[in-house]
Image (spheres, rainbow, N blue to C red):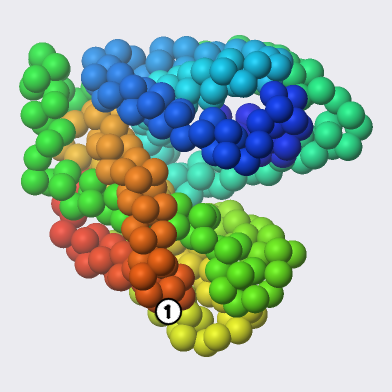
């Protein structure tokens, strides 16, 4: 799931030149795939809990690894847009079952594992980025890079697919019954937490470098350093999340880490300096690292719901927060009151997370 994302990020300039797209056209190319996101999410929400997660995860993985090389091979702009849209669609077919299977493994081991799972995702993105950077330096065409990495990943998937668990389905019945089980009062605070988590994470990704380089006047190099430092801090912090969950419990951990993130980022917003801005985003990333694994664990341990049904509600909450509200709200606030004050909405969202986690009920859940 993550290696193609990192590899694609590293080869975007080459693919853009390959199809002859300027900034405006390339922006369009990355806007249209939101249609694929919506279609993919709707499809997997309908299938979750009704089709086996192991089958969906393997099929989705195969489609992802097939789509990316074909997209990178094309020299036609329309074909790349179609490829990006297809990639967004099939990624959803993979990601919800993938999360459900991770929760199933965590349940069987009877200890927190979701933090390590998210850390593996981050490591895959990093490895893909390194592979893409080296391929670009050696002059390897993007489609060759993705064909090789996809081939290797298919072999790895074939070797370990038989080890994947099968999800235990909590409920049966019609599609209407399945949807009715998911949309209930117990899932409402979890879905709201997913929305806020998506908003905070995407806002930090979109505005980190811009705030440091332009608002603080530190230049593009400092902006790149800030983004890299925050991403590294978040991945490293994930390595400690499982142990902290076992020791503190989910509610106490999320509440403590979000208060830490809100206080650290808020104080650094008050201090008008590039160094403080970089430190603020690092503290935000480290503090927020516990939220996503915890939200998935809470959603996957709701009585009467299968893991995939719970995870599907997390995806329903996260997508509008990350894809729609994060870029639009902070952009609008920035135009009205300035980016520095607009970023205080992140602090408010993080504080709301610390409140909502106390309203969640769960069963058979680590922490």
For label 1, count other residues whose C-alpha is less than 10 Å away and answer few (under 14), some (14-19) or many (20+). many
Lateral position of residue 332 relative to residue 60, left or right: left
Residue 269 in sight here: yes
Residue at (65, 76) in percent of width and height: 217
Direction bottom: furthest residue: 271
> Residue beneath label 1, please?
266
Residue in front for this viewpoint, 217 or 306: 217
Helix, strand, or loop for circle 1?
A: helix
Q: Is residue 44 above or below residue 241?
A: above
Quarter location, residue 56: top left
Quarter location, residue 137: top right
Lateral position of residue 310 relative to residue 263, left or right: left
Q: Quadrant of the C terminus?
A: bottom left
Residue in front for this viewpoint, 202 or 97: 202
Where does the image place residue 166, in percent across and percent down from the top left? 37, 19
Residue 128 in sight here: no
Q: Is residue 277 above or below residue 288?
A: below
Residue at (59, 45) in percent of width and height: 122
Quarter location, residue 182: top left
Residue at (33, 51) in percent of width and height: 325
Where does the image place residue 298, in percent across and percent down from the top left? 27, 47
């Amino acid at each position: 799931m993550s290696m193609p994302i990192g590899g694609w990020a590293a080869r975007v300039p080459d693919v853009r030149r390959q199809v002859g797209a300027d900034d405006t056209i390339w922006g369009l190319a990355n806007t249209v795939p939101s249609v694929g996101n919506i279609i993919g999410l709707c499809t997997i929400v309908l299938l979750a809990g009704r089709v086996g997660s192991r089958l969906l995860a393997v099929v989705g993985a195969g489609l992802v690894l097939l789509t990316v090389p074909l997209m990178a091979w094309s020299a036609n702009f329309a074909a790349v847009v179609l490829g990006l849209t297809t990639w967004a669609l099939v990624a959803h077919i993979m990601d919800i079952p993938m999360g459900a299977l991770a929760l199933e493994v965590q349940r069987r081991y009877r200890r927190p594992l979701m933090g390590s799972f998210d850390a593996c995702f981050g490591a895959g993105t990093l490895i893909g980025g390194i592979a893409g950077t080296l391929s670009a330096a050696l002059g390897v065409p993007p489609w060759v890079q993705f064909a090789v990495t996809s081939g290797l990943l298919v072999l790895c998937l074939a070797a370990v697919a038989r080890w994947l668990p099968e999800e235990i389905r909590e409920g049966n019945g019609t599609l209407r019954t399945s949807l009715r089980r998911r949309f209930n009062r117990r899932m409402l605070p979890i879905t709201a937490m997913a929305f806020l988590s998506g908003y905070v994470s995407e806002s930090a990704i979109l505005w980190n470098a811009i705030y440091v380089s332009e608002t603080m006047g530190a230049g593009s190099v400092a902006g790149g350093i800030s983004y890299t430092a925050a991403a590294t801090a978040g991945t490293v912090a994930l390595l400690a999340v499982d142990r902290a969950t076992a020791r503190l419990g989910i509610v106490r951990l999320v509440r403590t880490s979000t208060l830490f993130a809100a206080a650290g980022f808020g104080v650094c917003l008050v201090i008008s300096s590039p160094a403080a801005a970089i430190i603020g985003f690092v503290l935000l990333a480290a503090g927020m690292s516990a939220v996503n694994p915890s939200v998935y664990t809470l959603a996957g341990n709701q009585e009467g719901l299968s893991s995939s049904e719970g995870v599907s509600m997390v995806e329903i909450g996260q997508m509008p927060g990350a894809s729609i509200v994060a870029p639009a709200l902070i952009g609008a606030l920035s135009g009205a009151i300035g980016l520095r004050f607009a970023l205080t909405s992140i602090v408010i969202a993080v504080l709301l997370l610390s409140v909502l986690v106390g309203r969640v009920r769960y069963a058979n859940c680590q922490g």
